[in-house]
Each structure stands twice: as C-alpha cells, then as structure tokens.
Image (cartoon, rainbow, N blue to C red):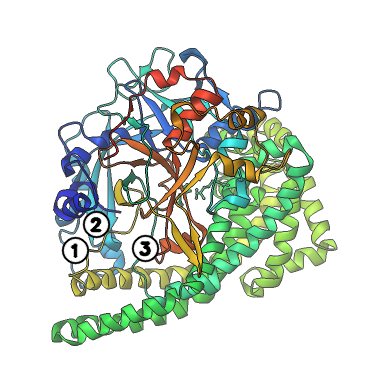
Amino acid sequence: MWLPMYLEKQNEKEMKALGLKLKADDLYAANRPSIKDAICQFSGGCTGEIISPQGLLLTNHHCGFDAIQKHSTLEYNYVEDGFWAMSRADELPCPGETAMFISRMEDVTALALQNVTEAMGERDRQSQIDKNLAQIKVSTKKEKWEDILIRPFYNGNQFFLFVTVTYTDIRLVGAPPSSIGKFGADTDNWVWPRHTGDFSLFRVYADKDNRPAPFSADNQPLKPAHFLPISLDGVEEGDFTMVYGFPGRTDEYLPAAALRQAAEVTNPVRVDIRDKALKTMDRFMRNDPAIKITYISRFANIANAWKKWLGEMQGLQTYNAVAKKQEYEAEFIRRIGQKPDWKVRYNNLLPRLNQTYKDIEPYAEARDNYLETFMRNVQAMGVASGLSGWVKTFEDGNAAAFSSKIRDVSARVENDFTAYSPEVDKAVFTVLIERFAKTMRPEWGGAFVRGEAERLGGFDKLADYLYSGSVLTNADRWKALAAGDAGAFGKALSQDPVLAFWRGVSAPYQEQVVPKLQEHQTTLNLLQRQYMAAQMQVFKDKRLFPDANGTLRMTYGKVRGYSPRDAVRYEFRTHLDGVLEKYVPGDYEFDVPQKLIDLWKNKDYGRYATKDGRLPVAFLGTNHTTGGNSGSPALDARGNLVGLNFDRVWEGTMSDLNYDPAICRNIMVDARYILFIIDKYAGAGYLLQEMKLVKGKRK
Ligand code: ARG
Ligand code: ASP
C-alpha cells in the first residue's frame, strides 16, 4: 500500500525486478498525465477506473449495487435481470454516486506539526494541528473546482495533502444480472475458488469545460487525462500485477494485545449480533420477493462485514498472529536495549499499551455491543439516534431551530424508508434486545432494557408496543406529520415511544461507558503514535508502508495460487466450467442464466478464451489489498487492465491486522470475463468500441 509519489524512491527498483515495464512517473506524475488520472475513489468507499476516452467507468457490481437497487422495482428488476443502456439517452442518473480523482499530493508534515511539542497534552496537540491544517488549506493553490484533503499517516506522525476533483453526475451504463455479478453471493463471499463476475459500468459526466457539475442533460461525458487500455492477453502464474486504488483501513502495526482483543473479545460480539440479525432478515427475504429487493443491498453490507470479522478472528488464531506479534515485540525490545537513548524513550511503551488494552477491554466490548445492536442493525434505533438532538431543540422551546431543519431531516428519514420494512426491523429488534438485556451490564443499559420488557410483558410485547406506536417505523405516518403543522410534529416526536426507548438505553451508555472509552482511547492513540514512530526508527532496515487510510495507494505482486492447508493447493484461476459445477437451478445464490449456459455449451467464447480453450472468470494475486480496493484495476507490467479487484481469500481475511504473504491473496475478475459478458452475454458489444483493447503485449 505504497504512496504513489514515492514509488520512484521506494519501489521502482523492486517493481522492475518483479516485471514492471513502466517508469514510476508513468504511474504517478503531478504535472503531466499519468495512470493515476484514470483512477478514482468511487462513492467514498470503493475504487473505479476510467476505461475509455468518453468517461466510461468500471467498478464492481457490489460497489454499484446501491445505485442498481435504487433503480429496481419488481417490474424493472435490474438487480435480478441486469441493465444495459443501449444508448447514451438510456443511461440512468445516480444521485449520490461520486467519482473523486487526485490531481496531486504533497507531504505537509512539517507544516502540520509546526509548534507541536512533545510536552503537549493530546487535546492541545490536536487543536494546534487543526489550526495548522486550516492554515495549510487556505495557503495551498488550487483551482475553483478542486478540493483539498489532508490526512494523517503512520498514526499521526506524517501528514499528506491531496488536491482532488470530484464529479457528481454519474450514470449507470451496465450491470450484469445478480446471477453473474453476485454469483455465489454470501456463501462464496470471501472465499476461493470464486466465480463471480463482480463488475458494473458507469459513465462520468462533466460540464462543457470538462469540469465537475451537478446532473444536467447538457453535461458531456468526461474526457479523462488518461484511460486504461484493456488487455486481451490475460495473465499466467508468476506474472507481475499491480493494483491501484483507495484502500480504506488497515492496522498492521498494533501490539499483540490489540490482536488478541479483536480475536477474542470484540470480533466475537460483532459476529454474534450480526449472525442473529442476518438470520432474521434472511427468513423474510426468502419468503417475499418485495422484501428481498428492499433489503438486498443492506443485507449484503451487513453480511460482508460479519463474514470478514469471522474470517479475521479465525485467521488470527489459525496463523498464530498473537504469538508472531509477540516475537516481533521481543525483537523490538532487544533492539532498543542496544541503544541507551532508545531504551529511555521506548522502554515503557509496550507495557503501557498492554495495560491500556486491558483497561479499555470491558468498555470496548460494551461499545461494540451497543453500536452493533442499536446503531447498525436496528434501523428504527439508528433513525432515533439521528433525530434525538434535533427533537431536543423542540423540547427546549426552540421552535425556529426545530422548524428550520424539518426539510433536511425529513429527506434523510424518507430516504431511509426506501429500504425499510417495519415487520423485518421489528423482528431484528426483538432478537437483538433480548441478547442485549442478557449481555450488557445492568448499569450500562442492560437493566433498562430488561425493565422495559418486564413492564410490558416480554420482549415481543415491548417490540409490538414500540413499533405499532412510533412515527419512526411508519413511512406514511412520518410523511403526513412532516408535511403538517410543525408544533404537532414536534410534539408527536417528543412523545414517540421508539425515541423514548432509544434515549432510555443510550443515557447510561453515554454516561457510564463513553467517558471511559474516550479516556482510554486517547491514551491508546498517543501510545500507538509513539509506538509507530519507534517502530519506524528501530526497524529502519524494513520498509514500513503507511497503514491504509482511504487515500490513493499502489500495491504490487504476482499472480499466484496458494496452499491453505497441508496437501491442499489452490490454482490461481477459475473458469466458466466452475460456474456450471456450482450451478443449482433456481437457487437463491447459485442459479445461472440460460444464456450463459448456452454460451458455455457451445464454447462460444470468441477471443476471450485462454490458450487451452476455457473461459477465465477470476484469478488470484499476492497484492496486499483491503476494503476500499474493491473496483481497483489490476494492471499488467505495461499498465493495461488485466483484472478488477473485488475480494480476498478466506484464510487471508485477517490481512488488515496481520498481513501474511504466504496466505493472503487478492481476488480479481479476469478482464476477459468482463468483456465476454458485455459482448457475448449482454450483446452490448458497442461499448467495446469506445475501449482500447490490446493484444500480444503480455511479455
Ligand atoms: N467481500 C468483498 C468486499 O469486502 C465483496 C463484498 C460483496 N459481496 C457481498 N456478498 N456482500 O467488499
Ligand atoms: N471487497 C472489498 C471491497 O469492497 C475488498 C476487500 O476487502 O478485499 O473493497
């Protein structure tokens, strides 16, 4: 996860030795077009890339899924059936989707840390830094249409500035049916061998000057500074690949105590809560196609993190991550012992980190219990928490402040209602509060929930009472009140049972847990920053990449299979034959469209087949990726797109905390499968005409 602007200094030599045929400044240059100009952060959480001179954008199906779902109804079900715009006019506007490109980046550490001293407390330090960053922002030159982002790196030891350009007129161009784009769904998610055609196509639009502009029929397709050619050659084991994108978050430099806590305390809480929520949602979705459409995107998101946390905790155990970190810490201690000034400065770090992880543990567990139950998995409670402060302005008699926000708040809540079923939410609520009442300490909210259930005659009765009487669980009631008299609306909200319940359970949490959590977290942040700085000094001989933080990074490696267990060896590539091996007619996750079956029967693969006549679907590499890298291009040695990153293998899901090159692999859709689906399956071959397809360039 290397910094694009330092590739020449830090990585070029190694990348060339591995096979790269370009120079570092072909990948990143600040003042001439380079490959980075084709890469964008897609809608905040994924990566996308431009693959034509007319702004065609490629990303994952799961990254475009929200947009696809929002355009879907039982009648026009693009989630089920796919969507292909047969002309520009058919492309579907996707409000809310964005494409953010990087114009340039800069190290601003010295300015960011000006007047920051070691003696400063954490709060003073942060306010000095905030002041410095504000100053940097106003003094940095940028164009009107550009924005400035500054992010901490290495736990706050360095700071980099990014000048960005964000386009907001994004339109849906194409998506395969879920039986291709989401083939294998949650059963196959995070797993190899994989057979998912996880891609979708959008187009970025700009104003007549090629600048960002809100949606307008007059906008034109973006003319990018660079777009990625697509290779028809495919990859073979051992080929060089690199993945350019926006990895979200890793924590590779934590102490062993943190890994143990994740594996044994916090991940298990999260997994258990989501497990219960998912089973409940799944029951409804399988019974009712309308509920399936409503919940399919939400379900996928909840399930994705659930499964990752499960894989992560298992991987940490199986591959002895804690013991390995302890060895690393022993080496750290050995090295600092050799230098008296290191010993003075760093000797206390690990003992203090260990103690603080011990101190924070009960609060961290309570935090995950509370957040997963009330903020992430029960929708009505999430809505209540977002409204409480605003309703308070009404209760405090500030009618003007209350009224002025009705429109904004209402737009947000009504948007939440587009993916809401009170029946499903109530069922999730019922199982989760029962769990909460049993597991949360009484004085931290457990007693409140138990008391409410006893008062109303059980958890079911409590749920009935809250969900039948609330405005937050009923879209029609909400709309009617929001459109009516502000005083009546405020009064109804201040008497709302769901809001009252949420306030009842959040008060002890806010009073008893949050202050302690913050106190220990502040200590951890300080210690981790010092520990990071110490590691960079003490392990100067190792190159330490900065943890992912949602900024543009380059990762590289080779196409390679792996061995998950004794005597088991996974090959690096899957094929269409494997899709048919997994095929279960009519299945929720493993159905296959008839047209694809016919193409397979006739071996009608055109120019997209491998040398041995099979159709490639996905392949593995040793590139170090994480969440946010989804949709990132996998490039060959010459910068041609050969794959589309979308996942990691099960045994390697721990890689955010413990990257192990022997076992961690990223999963990419083979570019040839994408082209095949567009061309042969969807009959949208006209889209290929705007792309640049290259052949005969593999070596
Ligand atoms: N695991 C991949 C990632 O973290 C793919 C997720 C999409 N698929 C799903 N079933 N939710 O995002
Ligand atoms: N599937 C992930 C994403 O959406 C990628 C990963 O976690 O490997 O970014």
Label 3 crowd (10 A; few <14 / some 14-19 / many >=20): some
Badge 2 amino acid: Ile
At label 3, the amino acid type is Pro
Horizontal placement of 495 versus 680: left or right? right
Q: Inspect the image, locate mark 1, and give the three-letter code of the amino acid beneath it.
A: Val
Vertical order, 684 against 178 (above or below) = above
Q: Earlier in the sequence, mark 3 or mark 1?
A: 1
| Mark closest to the chain's N terminus, 2 or 1 | 1
- Most foreground residue, 585 or 367: 585
Count the marks: 3
Is label 3 in a helix, a strand or a loop?
loop
91 sits left or right of 333 in the view = right
Taking the spot 53% from the left edge, 51% from the top edge, the residue there is: 193
Disc 1 element: loop
Tell me the quarter of the picture where residue 230 sits: top left
**Residue 566 placed where, x, y %?**
50, 70
Q: On the image, numbered disc 3 is attached to which residue?
A: 661
| Disc 3 and disc 2 in contact, CB within 8 angstroms | no
In this view, the mark in front (3 or 2): 3
Q: Are marks 2 and 1 in contact (CB under 8 Å)?
A: yes
Tag 2's secondary structure? helix
> Farthest right residue?
457
The outermost residue toward the front is: 612
Q: Is residue 90 above or below residue 599?
A: above
From the top left corner, tell me how far across and down residue 316 is, in percent.
48, 70
Q: List the residue tagged with mark 2.
A: 129
The residue labelled by disc 1 is: 116
- In primary-sequence order, the first of circles 3 and 2 is 2
Q: Disc 3 and disc 2: Cα gap in Å? A: 36 Å
588 sits left or right of 71 in the view: right
* Marks 3 and 1, how far apart at CA: 38 Å
